Amino acid sequence: MRRGENEGSLTAIPRISPATPTVPKPPIHRLLLAPLLLLPAACDPEIDSALPPQPEILATEPLSRRLEEFVGGHAKLVWTKQLSGDRPDSSAVDDHLELWGLDTRDGRGARRILDDQDNYARPLVSPSGDHIVFTHKGIYKKSGSDLRHFEPSVFRIDWDGEHLEKLATGYAVDVWRDPATSVEWVYVTDLLPTDKGTLYASRLERFKLLDPGDRELVYDGTQLGVENIQLSRDGKRASGLFPWPDAGLMNLEDRTHRRLQRGCWPSMAPDDSHLAWVFDGSHKNLHVFTEDARDTWPVAVDGAPGVDGREVYHPRWSNHVRFFAITGPYIGETLGQSKAATVEIHLGRFSPDIRSVESWLQVTDDELADHFPDLWVKYSETRAAELAKANPVPPSPPKPQPKPKAETIERDWPVTSLPLLFVWEDRSRENLAGAFPGRACGVEAREQARFGPRHEMLADGGRFDADPESSRAVAAHFAGKHPAFTIEVLATPATDRQDGVVAGTEHFQLRQRGSDWVFVSEQPGRQHHWIGTARAGEPAHLVIASDGVEYLVFHNGKAVAQGVKNVSDVEMLAGRRGLTFGGGWDGAIEAVNIAPGRLDESRLEAHWKYLRAKIADRPAIPRVRLRATLLEMTADRPVEALDTYPRALLAYLYRVEEVLEGSYSGDKVLALHWTVMDRMPLQGFPRRPGDTYELLLEPYAAHPQLVGERQWNDILEPLELYYDVATPQP
């Protein structure tokens, strides 16, 4: 570390806003949307949301006193301050950063912890409040490569800026205190080379803060994203990315993970409620989940005075479940092109049920960007000590467990002990194939294909490619001599008659030809099987099963006799190598199961019964067709602004001229359009203000699949948001 290099040349003293904590007024459209996103809850988690019964406000320095009044007592805050550049360094890439802190009881207000500029990344307050932990990423590039490489090191410093100590290698993501022993553990990752802003790691480890010599492996089940990994108070759960954009929870007792939603910056509640949140693609809302994911709800975090509905970043739960920190607003076409001078630290206080933000406090107010805030509240540690004392058998630390022995993957569908080649119920599921503990299966939307409101594949604009490992597994199995298999798909055609591929590889295709569902294969041997009649809008459960010699065909749980219809003239359409879904076909695809054996008739009937009940529970989504004149647009964003996102949506404001179908009573409508898909700009955008367009819209709240997609909305008018469901045009 370089010390004293820029001493005396800095002008980063913050101008603190005199405003007192304020109670936000949620935008009207959020009040309308929130109830629609709730799911039935099994039971409410026990949230340790208590605040001090008698707040202890002892601070005399003005900002410190406001902070104590906000949280109810002694508090500390650390962050990084950006010293140069007009654009925010929101990923802590440069060395022109300072480490700043605020201890409400030392009378010094907001101040530098160290005088030098350097690469201070992800500063953390230890649970005891005695230490600050931060990382120097050690970024470098190799000749001829655009990849950033890392040699990260973790440091510890006292609040007075003394006793700077290098602890170990790694990127520090959290500091957790064992409630049984009070030992503080630093959790770290490695950092993999990348050319993106998003950081990836291969493993999570830990070492003792005051005895860092020995390391323990915590998790290496999948690649990880590093922002945010946070532990629950009992140390049994942690938030994480597996990797970005799959956000969810790690079970540190058995080293498994569960995906909750696509998004970024997940965070773990610091009590034992095991609540977690995922930050959405608009960078304006948290989506809070119970541990079992039976209940989820959105919380808008763009309502702080001074943010006023614009993007925010760096959301992180404090050590008290009621408080969190963010940075913002980010005003500009992209996060990276925003104005650094507007980016400040804001603290939020949740309502006791964590369903809204009841108050805000702005901490910094200067011309320099502030990043990576971490808030520590003394009362939370006092409360944790009281609970540990009341519980004579506190939780043990999450020591690494041996790799699990071979078992069966438990799932509601499909019901089989076979190590599946590929399984994909929908995008919201775990979708684990292979032997226990399972290989995650996924699909990637190509061209103008996208996901639907039930997280299904919508193939009208393109196709979906299965993940490479699954494609290889399916290809290897079907390349064998007379392989046994079961192929199961739930397909909903948009039209009665069309000619396209629902699912296929170089070995087989499941097609709609005209009004017929047809299975055709070239290997092993030519096979042509009629499965039934396609009807627009009606889900069809299509199954082909073979023991290597005989074939069974099922449509909606019933066996289909062959010879009823001659389809021997059907040929395989030209397609791409690997396992793909869609291709010249308009409709929805879900519940895909490819098994390395023939499932019996009773299982297949049970599968259709499960899927039929699932379909029956789906509420109808209201749709409206309008003729409307464009009034205002969100500024167009280039593909480069997406970073690692493959798609993007922009909000446009229209004046309603005529309701062509459905019901709509407003004189204006706020619509979200796809403008970039598969990293290609769509024709027709940006549109022209004053021109009139026909819009096919559904309520945004009915489309949870959009939460993790990159979105920009510069329209601050408080209207309910709608989503353009028309097929995007290339």
Image (cartoon, grey):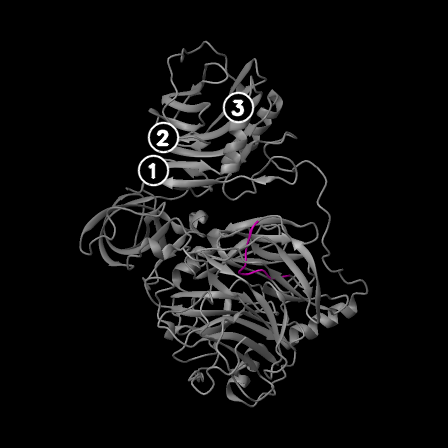
Looking at the image, residue 137 lies above or below residue 280? below
Contact check, label 1 and label 3, Cβ < 8 Å: no
Measured Cα–Cα span from mark 2 to mark 3: 24 Å
First of labels 2, 3 by sequence position: 3
Instruction: Tell me the residue at 59%/65% (across/down).
Output: 172
Find residue 478 and name its label.
Answer: 3
What residue is disc 1 on? 461
Measured Cα–Cα span from mark 1 to mark 3: 28 Å
Q: Amino acid at mark 2?
A: Trp
Residue 104: say if magenta. Answer: no
Measured Cα–Cα span from mark 2 to mark 1: 9 Å
Eye-nearest disc, 1 or 3 = 3
List the single residue furthest toward the right. Answer: 392
Mark 1, Cα crowd under 10 Å, few <14 / some 14-19 / many 20+, is many
Which region shows up in magenta? 223-231
Instruction: Tell me the residue at 74%/72% (across/down).
Output: 386
Q: Amino acid at mark 3?
A: Phe
Question: Residue 145: x percent and y percent?
Answer: 42, 55
What residue is disc 2 on? 585
Q: Is residue 351 left or right of residue 452?
A: right
State the residue in front, 44 or 282: 282
Instruction: Tell me the residue at 78%/70% (across/down).
Output: 389
Residue 225: say if magenta. Answer: yes
